[in-house]
Image: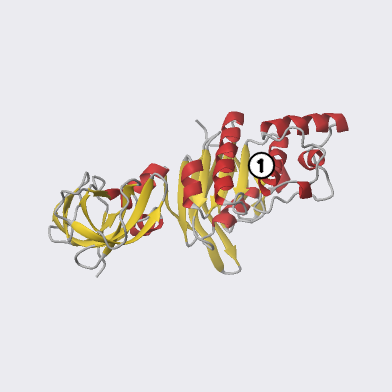
Amino acid sequence: MEALLSLNNIECRYDDNAVVKDLSFHLKPGSMVCLLGQSGCGKTTVLRSIAGFEPLYSGEIHKHGKTISKAGFTLAPEKRGLGMVFQDYALFPHLDVASNISFALKGQSKAEKRQVAEQLLETVGLAGYADRYPHELSGGQQQRIALARALAAKPDLILMDEPFSNLDVELRERLGLEVREILKQQGIAAILVTHDQHEAFALGDMVGIMKDGCILQWDTPFNLYHEPANRFVADFIGQGVFLDGRLISPNAVETEVGVIQGDRAYPWPTGTAVEVLLRPDDIVPDPNSKLTAEITNKAFKGATVLYTLKLPTGNQVLSLFPSHDDHPIGTRVGVRINADHLISFHKDK
């Protein structure tokens, strides 16, 4: 399948400062991908370069095989066949909902525009809202209108810059999944920029982890969690702690919690000092285990409780227990290590 969008070794600069460096990825038609990273990593600049708001210093961007950006050439945003959804919704306060949605439609009668608006309102679950004004809508409703407006011109790609960050957590999760479903039903591809890994994992077919203007790993959410390419990605994704260890065979590490044997082989010599990543789901309750730890903190998560556990050495790890295993702080509990996906990194001296 031909790529809908290709970014090939692009670089963007502000003055002499390269904020995006040698960045590449491809987007298939109808897929949804996320650029995930901390503030200042360059993810919004990448989105702006795709939209045509940011020129390229080097590299190229192609859409349907045609160059839309390269050094010295930037196709105008309105000629790129893109839709955009912003963090602040960017609705016109003096226009009603129907007029906001149909604002960019050209060459259609007022009745035709109204029909398009009403069809899209039904698509985003807001049928009957055509005559309301933005100030009469909640934040979630305004974001749905912004999506409807982006869909009005029937783009094959929508760019979304932190579109749900102004909403409360529950609404953000629910609306994000609804937007994903709408785009999948319409066969429209999307690129979402976010700093929220839960959002990226829930919505993205593929996720790019960004740092200092580069993509460190472009992968599925599953692989990012279980097969991180480097220590930064391992530390950035999910929750977990690193324990010191020593490689005793290609697929086994000796640590303070015992020997951990995994499903991969490392090329380093026996005796190599490593760091082992243990996530909360790697440490499971076992009342019969010889390994015990003291509960120093707890966070109720509904179906599970996240315990902070102090090991005999004083190091702390995290563990998820079923919520009916309710233990007070200060209790010693038995645990065992269930880390089939052994994640180790060479320990820097």
Residue 55 placement: quadrant: bottom right
Q: Residue furthest right?
A: 110
Lateral position of residue 293 relative to residue 78, left or right: left
- Closer to us: 111 or 2: 111
**What residue does disc 1 label?**
82
Vertical arrangement, residue 234 with respect to residue 108, above or below:
below
Q: Nearer the viewer, residue 342 or 208?
A: 342
Left/right of residue 54 with respect to residue 8 in the rendered view: right
Q: How is the image coloured?
A: secondary structure
Please identify the quarter of the rendering in which residue 105 is found.
top right
Q: Circle 1 sits in a helix, a strand or a loop, which is it?
A: strand
Judge whether residue 319 can be spotted in this image: yes
Q: Is residue 89 left or right of residue 185?
A: right
Amino acid of disc 1: Leu
Q: Position of residue 42 (x, y in %)?
A: 54, 59
Left or right: 123, with 21 as reference point: right
Query: In the image shown, does 285 or 121 lie closer to the viewer?
Result: 285
**Residue 142, placed above or below residue 117:** below
Q: Quadrant of residue 123?
A: top right
Q: Position of residue 108 (x, y in %)?
A: 84, 32
**Residue lying at 66% horizontally and 45% vertically, measured from the top left:** 140
